[in-house]
Structure formats: C-alpha cells, structure tokens
Image (cartoon, rainbow, N blue to C red):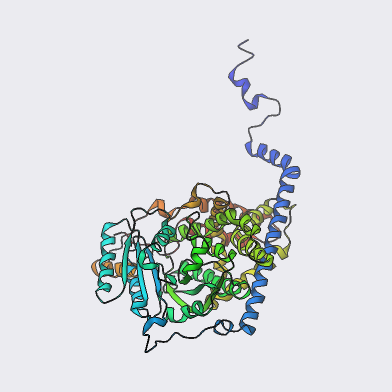
Amino acid sequence: MGDVINGKNLLPESFPGASVDLTAQLGLLWDLVRAPVIVPLLSMAVYVCLAMTVMLFMERLYMGIVIILVKLFWKKPEKRYNWEPIREDLESGNSAFPLVLIQIPMFNEKEVYKISIGAACNLSWPSDRMVIQVLDDSTDFVIKEMIEKECQRWASKGVNIRYQIRESRGGYKAGALKEGLKHDYVKDCDYVTIFDADFRPEPDFLRRAIPFLELNPKIALVQARWRFVNSDECLLTRMQEMSLDYHFTVEQEVGSATHAFFGFNGTGGVWRIAAINEAGGWKDRTTVEDMDLAVRAGLKGWKFLYLGDLQVKSELPSTFKAFRYQQHRWSCGPANLFRKMVMEIVKNKKVTVWKKLYVIYSFFFVRKIIAHMVTFFFFCVVLPLTIWVPEVEVPVWGAIYIPCVITTLNSVGTPRSIHLLFYWILFENVMSLHRTKATFIGLLDAKRSNEWVVTEKLGDALKNKSNAKAKKFKFNFNFKFNFGDRIHLTELGFAVFLFFTGCYDFMYGKNNYFVYIFLQTITFLIVGFGYVGTIVPSA
C-alpha cells in the first residue's frame, strides 16, 4: 500500500499530461475567462467612461460658451448691481460705515500669522467700525504666546483686535467660526469677513466689497479671487495655479453670472451675518464647511456675487505632503456633502427647478465626482487594460479628440503656463488616483471622510532657512531621506503596471498608446518617489 500512495504521487507531474509550467496554466485560465467575462466587463467599462467623458465635455463646453458671453456682453458687477462707495459724513462721522467683523482662524500658524494679522489691521476701514477676531486653535503654547503678543502689539496701536481661544478644537475651523460669532461684541456687526492665516487682502478690500452687500439686500456673499504669491516657487505650485485659475476664471464666474450661486471658497469673502444665521450657521458635518454653508444659504434664496477683479494674495502648498492632504479634503468633502444634501436639494421649494438641476448635476455630480473618476478610471485603468484585451476598442474621439478639447478649455485660466499643459495633464492623471479614492470615501461616508489636516504654510521660513544654512554651511550638502513621507506605494504600483502595459503595446499593440503610457509611467514614478514640490530641509 505504501508503494501505491506516497508523497511523490501527489505532485502535479505525477498526473498524465500535467505540467509545472505555471505560465502556461495562467495562460489557459486567461483564455477560458477572457471571452465570456473579461471582454464584456471591459466593454461595459469603456462605455461608462465614454459617457462620463461626454458629460464632462458638455459641461466644459457649456461653461466655455457662457464665459465668452459674460466677457463680451455681460455688464460689470458694479453696473448689474447697485454700487457706490461709502463716504464719510462730516456730521455723523463714520456711522455711514457698517460694523464689520474680520475673522482669522489659525492653527499653529508659526510662519504666516503676522502676515494675515498685519494685512487685516491695515485695511482702510474706519477702526471704530471694524473688529478683528483672531481665532486661535493652536496646540503649541509657544505659538499661542507669539500670536497673542502680536495681537497685543496691534491693540496698543489703537486697532480693535480680539484674541480668542477655545478649550477644545471641536468642529475644527467650522467650530471656531461658529464660536466666534457668539461673543457679545459681535451682535452689532452686520457682516463678517474671513481670511485664512496666509491671506493678504489689499487695504481697499472692504471698501470695494461691502457696498454690494449694503445696497443689495438679497446678496449674502461677496467672494474675491485668489492670487498666489508663491506660484513660481516650484513645478507643483505652477500645476496648482493652472487648476485654480480655471476654477476662479471660469467656474466661479459662470456660477455667479448665471445663477448667482457658487461654492464659497472658505476665505477671501464677505458674508452677511443674517444670511449665515438663516441658513443654520456653520456646521462641521463635512470637511467643506464653506461649501455646506453656501449650498444651504443658496437653498434659502440668497444670492452670491463673485468679483474677479477683487483679488487677495495667498500661498499655495509647496510640499507634496501638504498638497495631498489638501486634495483629500477638497475631494472627499464635496462628495460627502452631496451624499448628505442631495435629497434636501431635491425637496427644496424656494429655488427654481433649473437652479436645483444646476446644483445637483453641474456643481456636484459632474465637477466634484465625475471629473475625478473619469480621469483616473479611463486614462489610468480602462485604456491601458484595452491594450491587453485588443478585442475591446476605444474610439479615437473618446481617447484623444474630446480629452484634448477638454484640456484646452481647462488651460484658458493660465495662458502663461500653456507650455506646461502636457505635463499638467500627466500630473492631474496621477492626482486623480488620490482624488478618486477620497471621493469614494466621501460618498460612502467612510472612516476618513471627516479627516481634517490643516494645510501647512511655509511663508518665508523655507527661504530664510535655506539662506541661513547656505551662510553657515556653504559647502555642506546634507540630505536625509524620510521613507514614510517620500515613498508612495500605490503610485509606484501603477507605475509598474503601466510600464509593462507600455512594453506590451510597443511589441504587439496597434494604436501606439505606448508613447503616452511611458510618459505617464515616468510621472507616476516621480510622484511615487516623492520628487514633487519643495523638499523642506531637516533642521
């Protein structure tokens, strides 16, 4: 019996015709599932991606047509709405100027706290008609002391500035803004202006914005445009400038001109406090408390006004780590808010059906969900997979022509960076992986949906630090590799997948996609190894 059954009889090669060639076995399995399973699923994925591409194309085309009409035929905001400068009255003094609250939320803003406080204190608004409120949630006691002393310094100059702290960071920024409106000295304020810690308004900011609110009682919000003081710092900041310039030049302008609605950007804007209260105040149920408030106020019938020529200087995140955290919040938050508000929008009876359709379909579904998903799934997953399954074809119009038109329309906001357009496409494709993951987290209301990480601002710290090091160690180059911050395994995994796909297409493909795929592979590798943005030297 032992001669009949032994360990060797159980090995694969003991069976007739059996082979240990694992590659051949996998190939046989692939052939078995390819036609009945893989081809239909991949074909369906292609159709879905093409449908999403057409939706995004129609949205971009619509906004492109509207922005042309706005620039050519729409009147300037000063002529569309009542507007005239507020002047001092010799008899009543400054009473013609409404009392304005300026909120500056902060969290361990060591490098930039002086910038925003100084800019707010230098606004050309009567000092007795302005209250500056520094909402400091810092956990570093040294930084808290520095910020408090800066507030005291300005207070000694006659500026009405208040330093406010909380016992806990409950609600993060939304909680700080909400708590700030509860103080007794705020009850007489008609408007509130919000500036994040790195924002630097021009002295005439209030004089240009407030008259729109004073003379047009239906307007709840006046939003200014962001300008970036460090856009030329590195390639990462140039890429961000291209994306954000389109947002401000087209998306905000179109929303303001056609529906008097757009998403509040969280800073650089002036709110009517009565509108905030009617909408239910600040809520911390998502990481986009600004968008949440804007949608709720819009559903109450309030109007918003975007002023493209009213600009506020700010800082872009220049480290890739800070940028990733910011993009997670900006992608996850809107998707999570959409999940929580879509039925409320549908049932609302105070706004028109057309406006509800715009908010649900255009503002949320296409821009906040479809735009991320189609970029990632189509160009990083589905299109490469069709190279391995040549039975499934992608029409040229869907793979090349329409995406080229969409990209061209996206580039109108930053003409000076037109030469970076191709690399911007590759970089956006890589970032779409991160944004798509964040979007799903928001839609599913998963664990990280309410993750809040304050975007790190460097101010002049990096420049000063580099100069100090250069003087002290002129020829000493010390580079420390931080594995956790620099290596991104998901991006590296996609780089490997795309590399082998490009090699296969080069040898056996018929559409020559390998040119794009190899370039996309390089971009995934650059991001995967963390060679993006400013690398902050170790202390």
Q: Nearer the viewer, residue 91 or 227?
A: 91
Residue in view at x 47 percent, y 55 percent = 284
Residue in view at x 49 percent, y 68 percent = 274
Q: Is residue 399 left or right of residue 426?
A: right
Whether residue 91 is visible = yes
Q: Name the image quarter holding residue 22.
A: top right
Q: Quadrant of the N terminus?
A: top right
Q: Name the image quarter holding residue 179.
A: bottom left
**Residue 80: x percent and y percent?**
59, 82
In this rendering, the answer to whether 289 lies above or below 245 is: above
Number of numbered labels in the structure image? 0
Q: Quadrant of the C terminus?
A: bottom left
Q: Is residue 291 left or right of residue 73?
A: left
**Residue 24: x percent and y percent?**
67, 38
In this rendering, the answer to whether 83 lies above or below 188 is: below
Whether residue 110 is visible = no
In this rendering, the answer to whether 405 lies above or below 507 is: below
Q: Is residue 218 left or right of residue 116?
A: right
Q: Residue furthest bottom?
A: 90
Q: Residue furthest front?
A: 91
Residue in view at x 62 percent, y 77 percent = 67
In this rendering, the answer to whether 122 lies above or below 427 is: below
Q: Residue furthest top?
A: 1
**Residue 181: x percent and y percent?**
41, 64
Q: Is residue 71 left or right of residue 220?
A: right
Residue in view at x 46 percent, y 81 percent = 208
**Residue 101: x percent and y percent?**
40, 71
